[in-house]
Amino acid sequence: MPSTRHALIAGIAGIAVLVTGCAGAGGGSTSGDGGEGASINVLMVGNPQMEDIAKLTKDTFTKDTGITVNFTILPENELRDKVTQDIATQAGQYDVATIGAYEVPIWNENGWLHELGTYAGKDPGFDTADLLKPMVQSLSGSDGKLYALPFYGESSFLMYNKEIMAEKGVTVPERPTWDEVADIAAKVDGARPGMKGICLRGLPGWGELGAPLTSVVNTFGGTWFTKDWQAQVNSPAFKKATNFYVDLVKKHGEAGAPQAGFTECLNAMSQGKVAMWYDATSAAGSLEDPSVSKVAGKVGYAYAPVMETKSSGWLWAWAWAMPKTTKKADAASKFMLWASGKEYEKLVGEKLGWARVPAGKRASTYEIPEYKKASAAFGDITLKSIEEADPANPGVQPRPTVGIQFVAIPEFQDLGTKVTQEISAAIAGKTSVDEALNNGQKLAEEVAKKQQ
């Protein structure tokens, strides 16, 4: 088996250097590390919570510390390419980057990340013990130390428009099966002019289409690999799950599904263009914000749909990591501790609304009266979904490594993306599911050979 460093560098070969119009990538003052005049470069995914922190930082963190933060914000797929390129090649362009549960253990193994538990332990206000255990475990190395600080954590669940369900006389079970979801999608499709029954990601990418699809594969009895690294991409269970997913989104899914990822489905749901959406629990805060959502107060939440498993929600944290290449560790650590701390949550609640708090990472968040009120519809189910998620045993058979919506090996970044490109083409009607999965099986077999 090749080293993870070589595998990751091979995976990013040929990626063009991405150019962003966001201010400050690679620029800014280099004077000082952690005090007045210091400047750090932060690369992060373009989700609502990240857009919020970009708006709040200057008048709060920078004002208090004198540290300027230059943000580069990219869509998820571009972010993954960019951050992998920067960290794996030791380019050193960024002092902080958002990565997740997939990258942390792999990149830590290669010595690419600063250990952050020491910084957190020295900050009496950070309260590491308050972090939810699943988040700590997913962001720790084999030595048990933290190598990333969670910004927000999530599982997955089903979101639905209660108003539409009431009009159609439909009751959504608290723990639905995928067959029940498909039946409901058919009943509510077209309930309003132009409204579709459900939104499911169709945008290629191991963390886009790959995330919800793999959670469906798990609960349908499938897996990417057996415990002894036999590829299973065109196995009956994987094929049944993929056919179900593709058929559902083709029949009752959003317009432009092959180009729809998390952001597009969030927009479709919040603007009332779809009646249901299966995706990340972290989306709820935006859906309940009346300043950006037309369905605020009208959304119901159910656990991730199942078939052969008791639960099927995924587990993820978007987290702050510090590459070993940074020369500004002190300033970078101050930013990360602030961004993952209790005071930042309070700031978001007071400035932007409590529903928009980057939750899912701290036990104390769910005891804040204002947040409990704002998250009444989704807070408890989010927390329980995170607690129920089992990265070691997400399906019906033993796995060779951990991961619910991904396989925790360096090669999966490339494999998952290529296979989802094939499946997205099937959603677009350009190929069949059988052909897509047969092509995917060949790719998976090559990966399996390296692991055996």
Image (tube, grey):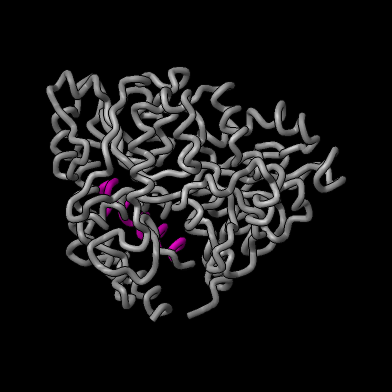
Vertical placement of residue 275 versus 338, above or below? above
The secondary structure that dominates the magenta segment is helix
Vertical placement of residue 321 versus 106, above or below? above
Vertical placement of residue 88 versus 130, above or below? below
Please indicate whether residue 298 sits to the left or right of residue 72 in the image.
Answer: left
Is-magenta flag for residue 422? yes
Residue at image position (40%, 28%) is: 375
Is-magenta flag for residue 419? yes
Q: Quadrant of the C terminus?
A: bottom left
Residue at image position (29%, 72%) is: 226
Does residue 306 appear in the picture of this structure?
yes
Question: Residue 13, position in %: x, y?
Answer: 56, 65
Question: Residue 335, position in %: x, y?
Answer: 69, 42
Please indicate whether residue 293 sits to the left or right of residue 223 in the image.
Answer: right
Residue at image position (77%, 51%) is: 328
The one nearer the camera, 134 or 217, is 134
Residue at image position (41%, 55%) is: 206
The one nearer the camera, 207 or 350, is 350
- Magenta region, residue range: 412-431
Quarter of the image holding residue 151? top right
Question: Residue 441, position in %: x, y?
Answer: 30, 69
**How many labels, in total?**
0
Please indicate whether residue 62 sits to the left or right of residue 139 in the image.
Answer: right
Give the residue at the far right of this rendering.
31
Question: Residue 330, position in %: x, y?
Answer: 76, 50
The one nearer the camera, 160 or 243, is 160
Does residue 201 appear in the picture of this structure?
no
The one nearer the camera, 193 or 167, is 167
